[in-house]
Image: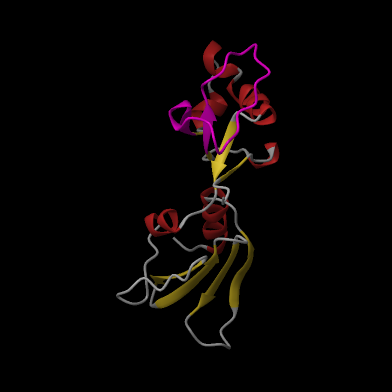
Amino acid sequence: METKYYTPDIEDLRIGYEFEFYQGYSSESDYKPNTENEKEEYWKKDIFTKDDALSHNDYNAGYFAELIKDTERGYIRVPYLTKEQIEKEGWQYPFTIDISILDRIELVKDIDNDRIILRYNIENKNLILQQKYHKDTPILFNGFCKSINEFRTIMKLLKIN
C-alpha cells in the first residue's frame, strides 16, 4: 500500500505551512496515531498562520510550541504532493488528454509568453521544471519535492506564479 502522508521535520514548520493534526487523543495520552490507518474524521486540516505566530493571547501564545510537541508525538501529518494539488496551482495538461503515466505526471504553465514544463514522479517525489520542450533548454529545477508546502516554496523562489 502506498503511503499518502508523512510526519514533517520540525524545521519545516513555518507561516503558511499546510498540515493535518490528529484530534482523537487526550493530552495526557502517550498514544501515537498511525497516519495511514486512523479514522479520517480524527484528522483536521490546518494552516499555520501569521496570526498563530504573533498572537499574544493565552490560547495562541503556546500554539507554535504545541505544534512542535504534536509533531514530535506524531499528531501532525502532511499529505504527499498530488496531481490535483498541482493542478489547483494553475498547472494544466499540455494536450486535451491526461498524459499521466502511472506514477508520473507532466503539466505545463504559460507565463509571460513562455511555457514551463513540469514533470513529477509521484513514486520518488522528483520534480523537474524546464522551459519549453526543447532538449537543450535549461532545467530550472530538478530535485525532491514532498508536499504542496515545498512545491509552493520552489515556485516562489523561481518566480513562477
**Magenta residue span:** 19-46
Q: Seen in the image, is 133 located left or right of residue 127? A: left
Q: Is residue 32 magenta?
A: yes
Q: Seen in the image, is 108 located left or right of residue 156? A: left
Residue 26 in the image: state x and y as whole percent.
58, 13
Residue 57 visible to the viewer: no
Residue depicted at 54% across the width and 35% down the height? 37
Extreme residue in the left direction:
96
Residue depicted at 62% across the width and 22% down the height? 66
Toward the viewer: 98 or 10? Answer: 98
Residue 89 visible to the viewer: yes
Q: Is residue 112 above or below residue 65?
A: below
Q: On the image, which quarter does residue 127 sit in?
A: bottom right
Q: Is residue 46 above or below residue 128?
A: above
Residue 55 in the image: state x and y as whole percent.
53, 21
Q: Seen in the image, is 117 located left or right of residue 157? A: left
Toward the viewer: 50 or 69? Answer: 69
Residue 24 in the image: state x and y as whole percent.
52, 21
Q: Is residue 27 above or below residue 46?
A: above
Residue 1 in the image: state x and y as whole percent.
57, 50
Residue depicted at 50% across the width and 33% down the height? 49
Count of residue discs: 0
Extreme residue in the front direction:
1
Q: Is residue 118 above or below residue 155?
A: below
Main SS, magenta residues: loop
Toward the viewer: 11 or 72? Answer: 72
